[in-house]
Amino acid sequence: MHKTVLSLLLLGVVFSGCKKEQDPFEISKHHIGLLTDSTQVKDLKTIFSNDSISKYISGDEFAGSVNNIEIFKKGGEKRLILTPETTLDSTSVIESIQIIDPQYKTAKGISTLSTFKDITAAYKISKIDNLINSVVLSVKELNASFVIDKKELPANLRFDLDLKFEETHIPDHAKIKYFFLIWND
């Protein structure tokens, strides 16, 4: 009897010691730190208790239906911009997250300090979109899009909106301006 109780106690200690604690800055397909794709707006105060939360509330019908929630470090630096699925609904889940703070990294080490070469070494680019001022790289593995400012590109590629970008067009040293994850689409 004592051996069974002692064995169970020892087994419990071993399993509780092996429990991996969530990295508050790790990015994956379904979470960013403690924020998950099922987190509701009302839970943000708990998740970001050490940060400041700023909510934009639209009262003007011409401002559109976007209601971004910005997360700031206590020092005032912007960390994240969250967009809820439903405007002005505390039970709404987060639809997309724009990552600005370089502390947030994917499991493969990609952050806002990474370059195009870093992204292509870590992930397969599934799509490249040519926008007016930027190029957007989509990575299906993460449900992420990485934005590179066209100022990072050679001058002859910056102004042609009809150009179908390929990976060979983008210099290895091109820096990420920011990136975002899209959930619940």
Image (cartoon, rainbow, N blue to C red):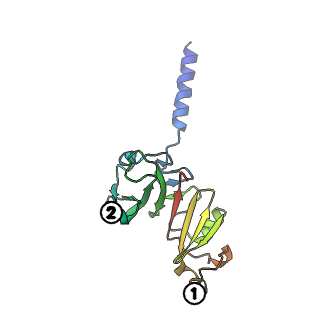
Front residue (pair 102, 29): 29
Q: Is residue 29 above or below residue 131?
A: above
Q: Amino acid at mark 2?
A: Asp
Give the residue displayed 53% in from the left and 51% down from the top.
Answer: 184
Structural distance between the alpha carbons of marks 2 and 1:
40 Å
Q: Label 2: state its secondary structure.
A: loop
Give the residue displayed 56% in from the left and 64% down from the top.
Answer: 145
69 displayed left or right of 184: left
Q: Which mark is residue 155?
A: 1
Give the residue displayed 51% in from the left and 48% down from the top.
Answer: 37
Residue 85: x and y in percent read 46, 52
Q: Are marks 2 and 1 in contact (CB under 8 Å)?
A: no
Crowd rating for badge 1 (residues with CA inside 10 Å; few <14, some 14–19, many 20+): few
Front residue (pair 84, 120): 84
Crowd rating for badge 2 (residues with CA inside 10 Å; few <14, some 14–19, many 20+): few
Q: Which mark is residue 60?
A: 2
Q: Label 1: state its secondary structure.
A: helix
46 displayed left or right of 5: left
The quadrant of the rendering that contains the N terminus is top right
Could you tell which of marks 2 and 1 lies nearer the N-terminus?
Answer: 2
Residue 163: x and y in percent read 64, 79
Give the residue furthest to the bottom. Answer: 156
Residue 127: x and y in percent read 64, 66
Residue 170: x and y in percent read 62, 77
112 displayed left or right of 60: right
Q: Amino acid at mark 1?
A: Ala
